[in-house]
Amino acid sequence: MQLVLTNELLLEAYRQGLFPMAYNFGSPVIHWVCPELRGQLSIPHMHIPRSLRKDVRKALKNPAIQIKINTAFERVIALCGETTDDRPETWINTSIKEAFINLHKQGHAHSVEYWQNGDLLGGLYGLSIGATFCGESMFSRTPNASKIALVHLVARLWAGGYQLLDTQFTNDHLEQFGVYEVPHEDYIKALNETLNMDADFTAGNRSEEDIITDYFAMRARQTL
């Protein structure tokens, strides 16, 4: 019998440190993943290359580019699940896609979107539980779009009071941002500490420019 991914089941699984993956897009089989080593990004200390910081600032000043949240969640997860030359397989099947759309409708799952001239060209999505954000997937259809979206995500998490950014795994793409691994037991301990904390993904409905400006200013103070 095919597993039904209800909101309650998914939220409880993430609280236990589990997350679902399909073998591929066409497979109806869902398996629960619990890595022995868990990928993490530091919210206040994520490594942002100087060139990317410049690109983030340029994007803020470019009227053709807009960074938005939660305006096109279904399109973001669909594009994250598309196969490409660099990603010939995907673990996002129809069940996972529909389940996260339902989580989004209930305010648990969120997207960060990179728009240029009215086109959605990059973005990411993930799940919010307490003061932990579990990043799920990202996509890019123009250079650096997903990277810029990631910087905006991290700045938003900092502004919203989040304590953990879970990347689940590490990979070559995330290594440039200082991703690191922690043992499963350490992740669960840190996760449990955040589950009853309040965090606000909207960051008080502040503008992207204000959020980024304050985040970069905080990081600059760290180097003094």
Image: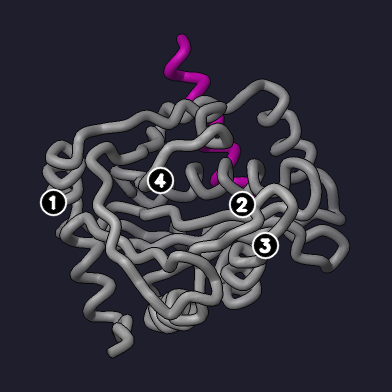
Q: Is residue 155 magenta?
A: no
Q: Is residue 100 above or below residue 213?
A: below
Residue for point 39% across, 52% down: 160
Q: Earlier in the sequence, mark 3 or mark 2?
A: 3
Frontmost of labels 4 and 3 is 3
Q: Name the residue carrying label 1.
A: 192
Kind of residue sitting beneath label 3:
Thr
Identify the disc placed on residue 208: 2
Residues at marks 4 and 3, CA–CA distance in whole angstroms = 20 Å
Residue for point 56% across, 27% down: 176
Q: Which of marks 1 and 3 is nearer the N terminus?
A: 3
Residue for point 19% across, 41% down: 184
Residues at marks 4 and 2, CA–CA distance in whole angstroms = 22 Å
Q: Name the residue carrying label 4.
A: 167
- Give coordinates of residue 52: x percent, y percent: 69, 30
- Report the residue that reaches farthest toward the top: 224
Residues at marks 1 and 2, CA–CA distance in whole angstroms = 30 Å
Q: Is residue 202 above or below residue 152?
A: below
Identify the disc placed on residue 209: none
